[in-house]
Amino acid sequence: MDAVLRIFRGDAQGGQFQDYTVPLHEGMVVLDAIHHVQAHAASDLACRWNCKAGRCGSCSAEVDGKPKLMCMTRMDEFQPSEPITVAPLKAFPVIKDLVCDVSWNYEVNKRIPPFHPKPPEPDGTWRMQQEDIDRVQEFRKCIECFLCQDVCHVLRDHEKKDSFAGPRFFVRVASLEMHPLDVASRTAYLEEQGGIGLCNITKCCTEVCPESIRITDNAIIPLKERVVDDFYDPVRLAWRWLTRRDRAP
Amino acid sequence: MDRFETYRYDVLVVGAGGAGLRAAIEAAAQGASVGLICKSLLGKAHTVMAEGGVAAALANTDGRDSWQVHFRDTMRGGKMLNDWRMAELLAREAPARVVELEGWGALFDRTPDGRILQRNFGGHQYPRLAHVGDRTGLEMIRTLQDKTVHSPGIDVYMECTVARLLKDDGRISGALAYRRETGRFVVFRTKAVVLATGGIGRAYKINSNSWEYTGDGHALAYDAGADLIGMEFVQFHPTGMVWPLSVRGILVTEGVRGEGGVLKNSQGERFMFRYIPEMFRADFADTEDEADRWVAEVIAGRTATVRRPPELLTRDVVARAIAQEVREGRGSPHGGAFLDIASRRKPEEIRKKLPSMYQQFYELADVDITRQPMEVGPTTHYMMGGVRVDAETQAATVPGLFAAGEVAGGLHGANRLGGNSLSDLLVFGRRAGLGAAAYAKAYAGDLQVDAREIEAIAAELLAPFDHVGGENPYAVHDGLQDMMGTYVGIARSESDLRTALSELERLRARAARVGVEGHRQYNPGWHVAVDLRHLLTVSEAVTRAALERRESRGAHMRVDYPDSEPAFATVNVVVRRRGDAMTVDQEPIPPLPDALRRIVEGKD
């Protein structure tokens, strides 16, 4: 049996969808179908991939309008009678075909204040309890597929890339802020550069996360609470006003 | 040449997996200016796929462990062909490198008293692998990536492929690369190059590797005149997925067996008891009862008082055993063995300790590993052989060239132990960074790159665009993978290897005629065409080295020479370029010093 893939072909100047017929086999995923098209019909079809096992987060695309990892999306999820549409992530500029320019994400990451551990025990190591790191390990499962960035309204529809870090980087900040060894504070970053206040917790990011990270509930909401505590608590506001000369520039 | 983008660095690191990142961090810390090049986006390198853990004798989980035991396990696992000094450095330095990662933010699973938890793995006498569930590689690469981003002095070039190294009067002086996004060439002028390009798995059809694993570093070093050693030792991991076709070869972590999983044939027999080699007989259980007691003790967090299950023998032994069971008609429906954890551990424990495996089988193979066994079989996984390096500095035999991680040879001998690759990346990535930075600092000469040479290479790289109606690069790659699997796979013979050499000639002729469509911007067909050159070089090196080693040892099995031969016990097979010809020589390995020999023999 065959399936038809309707794939975006084009670049920053524009493009169109083109149909390709591929034979189906048991267990086939969308990325297999893309590879078939490359090998047999369009050797210059651009797409990113690496591990083909849902571990590296390279092959993100919009399959029938839904942000997915192509390597983890089975062809038998779709009606064989209908063409399957494959398009690049919409929130980022297209480079060519299914490859888009995600460099903005790497720039955002650079601005997050880095990990800063407390001093180790006298033996040079640290003690941590598993219960204390479980919640941070959830955030560290992130494979940087940027599907959450792709569906976030603030980035996708409102184009606030200059003032909003996006769910991926709130997860990243949460993994640092809740790290048992870390002593730095990133609430100023979240408030002033990260723009966490713009998130209106619609949970679209959580729904598309292939690692099932509860981005909104476990990362964003607790971070919002920390920002409120640090910046909008009246007692702390007064304290900060009184001690502001001592604040680091 | 002026028309090419040009950059200058003290040290150019090629590859941004664990070894490349660690090398870049160290070179920058020494004050060198560093260019870091990766074929993919940052953080996507193959290290991300490492599952089981990083081997380091921290002795947290079992206090009897020490660097000496780790050294002994590594040498015995490598069938004594290892560069013993590298094995010693690995065992001595791995614990500090792991603790250092923790100081950079990595979060390993914990023991009840809050230290780094360690798990059992094949060939390691004690639980030794620091891990994070079954996604240890992701934790490592993310930690190193963030350290790199915040290290001053490192410029990262993402989606950039190095096509050739450049030399000036015998020394490394630069590299010619192209950007995938635009197809434009980039000239890097540098005093030192650290190769950290990983392995060669894409030379085989059934493999656990990403598209990046095309032997670039091996071929770049070979072309530059460096020695390659141990190229006959390709590790076939015993447990890759075998069904459905779409996922064939994808890795199933050894951690499944470390957590108590057992291997069975179609008759329900735990066949590994029949495959314990003489050398390891004293260390492994010979009854199911004893093996099960070991698992029970370990799971309960107690120190094991009995011998370990034979499922935890080294990878070469287990892979060959599965292949033999299949050959003799006792395979699973799709030509593998059954790996069963469902009947050994509780569902919630399996999901906690092996979450990626659970997800991988559930979503891609419709198998619930908490209820059903997995079907597994050998998959090309790792290259033991590689660039011959100095143990202390990772310097190759060409001045200015360094190599670390999978692309370097020697450390693992004839067979690598699981978990030793991640410690390799950290220990020798750091040493390569130190070595390259020191070399660059000490070298005051003015290195040139040859503009005519660069123009000629560029023209050669662009030739596929002129071959209208030429060979399809994907078809040539496919042909190479089939050929290597058939003639240079897990079981080899003189006649098969000779056939492979003549097939390689034909494939080389086809590769010279490949044509690609479209333009230079992000063109995967062109990228495959460029990679073919490297794949053909490493495939020839593997084949010639395999012909030369007329014995079976570790991962290298010759059906026409089924035994290990004393004459080959102390020699490396060295592959190097002389003119345009690939030559093969046997060279003696320096003898093991007495102090280390006593450790290997278990007397210290």
Image (tube, coloured by chain):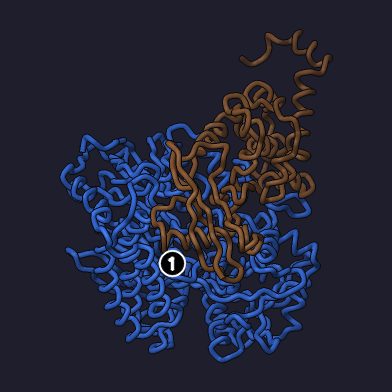
Residue at the right extreme, as displayed: A235
Q: Colour of chain A?
A: brown
Callout 1: few (<14), some (14-19), or many (20+) C-alpha neighbours within 10 Å? many
Q: Which residue is mark 1?
A: B384
The chain letter for the residue carrying disc 1 is B
Q: Residue B76 at x, y = what percent? A: 51, 73
Left or right? Give the position of A116 relative to B175.
right
Residue at the front extreme, as displayed: A81
The residue closer to the viewer here, A17 or B68, is: A17
Q: Which residue is painted at 63% across and 31% down in the image?
A: A157
Chain shaded blue: B
Q: How many marks?
A: 1
Q: Residue B537 at x, y = what percent? A: 30, 65
Element at badge 1? loop
Is residue B92 in view? no
Q: Which residue is painted at 57% across and 52% down in the image?
A: A85
Is residue B564 in view? yes
The residue closer to the viewer here, B393 or B550, is: B550
Q: Which residue is painted at 58% across and 28% down in the image?
A: A161
Left or right? Give the position of B80 relative to A72.
left
The residue closer to the viewer here, A5 or B166, is: A5
Q: Which residue is painted at 62% across and 38% down in the image?
A: A149
